[in-house]
Amino acid sequence: MQFVDECTINLKAGNGGNGIVSWRREAGVPLGGPHGGNGGDGGNVILIGDHNVNTLFELRNHKNITAVDGENGRTAKETGHGGSDVHINLPLGTSVYDTNTNELIVDILESGQTFTICEGGKGGHGNAFFKSSFNRAPTLHEHGDLGEEKEVTLKIKYIADIGLVGLPNAGKSTFVGQVSSAKPKTANYQFTTLVPVLGIVNLHNEKVVFADLPGLIEGAAEGKGLGHEFLKHIERCSILLHLVSLNPTDGEDVVTSYKTITNELKEYSRALLDKPIIIVANKIDVDGAQDNLKKLKKSIKGKIYIISALTKEGIDELLEAIYQDFQKIQLKNKQKLLNQTQKVKVIEVKQQKDFAKDLRIIDLGNNRWEVQSEYMKYWTNKIPLDTKDNIVRYNQKMQTIFVEDTAKKQGAKPGDTLLIYGNEFTIDA
């Protein structure tokens, strides 16, 4: 399957069904009263973390994903069926951004994690809902709310505990293949790995995820080669294994190779250098490796683990070191989580919402005035003006935010026309 790690899609939750006006008509029940049911709720759009999915390829051909609308209400006070939800399975490590604002909405990090990204509209009430002691035969009813709609950009940043970095041909794929059940493609040429490969390694009965990341080149932080396409996958790794090839035939001088990768990590994000980085000198089994190892030891202070990914020499010692560092990080993360949960919650007092805050009255000339208001936009969609009761209720909503009074203050006169999202009203004296 083709590898796709970023795409943009449009998501739309289902609209709520409409409530209806209906009357109970049965023999022997002369005063049956209102019987109109409510509309069903629209379906949600739900994101699900799925460890079996590793690409966004399937979503590339589904740019518009829409949940099912709720059904309209029925007679006998029956509520319409709710619309079916749409579930979108995403790879672990997917970040979901609002395409228009570039704001992060959610990170999908765990298998089975769910997140409702677009909520379905609530069903509108039928006239049975509005029955009261002072209105026993209401003709009030509502349209369903519109479902939420978002354009989102999905970006995969692979979740791995251990990330392998190094120039092409450093031997990362061979290493992952030896210590895990992953079977990445390997060969003696550069850029064998074109997509990240995850392998699970059992360390002291604890599963640790290793990521074989595509080889970097000089200038990768500026987008050269595979560049930003894969540097971003390093960000979520807890520990980095920096593999350096000791094979003299693999290209650059061994010290230059080491510095190239270090510089690229620093140029992309200095925070990467704050992660634990384990230096691994690979291919100790080839001719000329000992001379290169001496050069590397002179240039680098600190521990260098010497291995042959091909023959498995030194791998057990390296895995033990990785496990010890990993345990320290796990302990630190648990303590951090504990400190966060012990923080005292601050309860904020909710402020009364000012629905008239965004009200605008625009003079169109010829005694016509356009009303702009999110509050009135919502209720225009919600209240169909097809019954006397609904017209009265709509007028009450207008009075709530002082539509006519505001228009008069701006110069409107009795008899002038108010245009409110497709509806026309005449200003009273």
Image: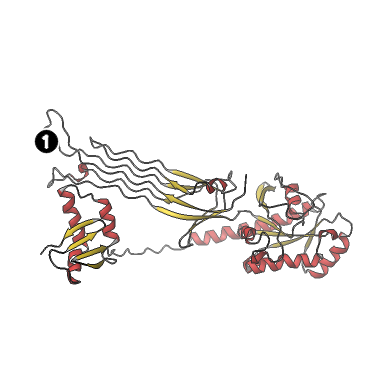
In front: 227, or 290?
227
In front: 146, or 278?
146
Quarter residue 370 falls in:
bottom left
In this rendering, position of residue 287 left or right of residue 260: right
Badge 1: residue crowd in 10 Å (few <14, some 14–19, many ≥20) = few
At mark 1, the secondary structure is: loop
In this rendering, position of residue 255 left or right of residue 24: right
Residue at x-position 18% and y-position 64%: 404
Q: Is residue 142 above or below residue 230?
A: above
Quarter residue 133 falls in:
top left
In this rendering, position of residue 338 left or right of residue 242: left
As drawn, the residue found furthest toward the right would be 287
Q: Position of residue 59 (x, y in %)?
A: 53, 47
Q: Amino acid at mark 1?
A: Leu
Name the residue that disc number 1 marks: 31
Q: Position of residue 26 (x, y in %)?
A: 15, 30
As drawn, the residue found furthest toward the front would be 366
In front: 56, or 319?
56
Q: Is residue 274 visible?
A: no
> On the rendered image, what quadrant is the C terminus found in?
bottom left
Residue at x-position 53% and y-position 59%: 338
